[in-house]
Amino acid sequence: MTIYHHRFGMIPLRSIFWGGGTPSVLTESAISTIAEAIHRYFKVPPGIEWTIEANPETLTAMRLARFVDAGVNRVSVGIQSARPSELALLGRAHTYSSMVPCLDLIRDAGIDNINLDLIYGLPGQTLDAVSESIEWVLSQGPTHLSTYALSIEPGTVYAKTGVSPVDDLLQLRMYREIRRRARLDGFRQYEVSAFGRPGYESVHNLTYWHYAPYIGLGPSASSFFNGMAYQQVSSLDRYVADPTPPVIRVPLALDSDTLATHFLIANLRRSEGLTYSKIRRELGRDHWGASAVSVVEMKRLGLLRRRNDRLQLTRRGVELMNSVLEGLL
């Protein structure tokens, strides 16, 4: 924080997302120390969206009070599933019975803006199990819902043991069921994996999908700032030894074609897509650069559509988002 402050002054913030781990395990004094530093080194307008990530088993009334004193007004809880067997599979420490008291604790602290995370596509998971979880999650009255299909990354425990997610067709049916139930409950899908009640779309999420500047602090944190996309070192020891962000250490900007491709991918995740006039305004050009041929092909395949000045994913494109991303990259 001090490095950014000394180089760029009081950078004005639009939102704060305190996550990338579990900040709810911090001590009360650590919460206050970090929050005070954020206010000292950045310009934090009153009432901006300030989210913390939390797991049900780590929240306490005292910690929440410190977070609220700092300015936190939104909590994202990693519920993941309403089924004990699935929580055990995911290695989650919380239980089904601990979730309701956790949500009550958050609301008692004066925070009503609550996001709940839900994972689907787990090994052996059924469509009925997903229906049960989404029904329970919606019954808890969240203002926002984030949904993620299980992804097996190389080097993880699942990859080493040969565990696989459900097949693609079942995963697609699960996604459709979640989307159907969320819409029936009054949520608007404003991004491929995000649903919000009217007025509760995440400002922080939309920063990414508008491809607006953002700063990430901490090991492995990603940023897009001052015309650069960069990532901090993953090693905690190396980060502590030298936390200087690449935007200062190696001031190399993205080339125009790479910037256009990243801009296109980010904006297409939003349900409304983006306009050609926006790319002309933001990038100073009226084409997609290296992605132009891919855009034409995606339209031919029925994954993208153009309506007047707007380019957006079709319903099929939303469901096959990974294929769209691969094609554009």
Image (cartoon, rainbow, N blue to C red):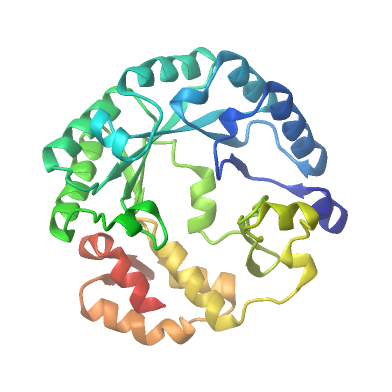
Q: Is residue 70 left or right of residue 206?
A: right
Q: Is residue 295 left or right of residue 253?
A: left
Residue placed at 42% from the left, 20% from the top? Answer: 103
Residue placed at 68% from the left, 46% from the top? Answer: 13
Is residue 307 in view from this perspective?
no
Is residue 90 in view from this perspective?
yes
Q: Quadrant of residue 232?
A: bottom right
Q: Quadrant of the C terminus?
A: bottom left
Residue placed at 58% from the left, 70% from the top? Answer: 282
Q: Count up the numbered dots.
A: 0
Front-most of residues 236 and 20? 236
Which x, y percent locates residue 122?
Answer: 24, 46
Which x, y percent locates residue 149?
Answer: 30, 51
Residue placed at 79% from the left, 66% from the top? Answer: 248
Vertical placement of residue 139 versus 216, above or below: above
User: In the current view of this chain or complex, which residue is farthest to the front?
Assistant: 161
Which x, y percent locates residue 269?
Answer: 39, 59
Q: Quadrant of residue 126?
A: top left
Which x, y percent locates residue 270?
Answer: 39, 56
Front-most of residues 11 and 26? 26
Q: Is residue 202 left or right of residue 85?
A: right
Vertical placement of residue 288 versus 282, above or below: below
Q: Quadrant of residue 268?
A: bottom left
Q: Is residue 259 left or right of residue 46?
A: left
User: In the current view of this chain or complex, which residue is farthest to the right?
Assistant: 6
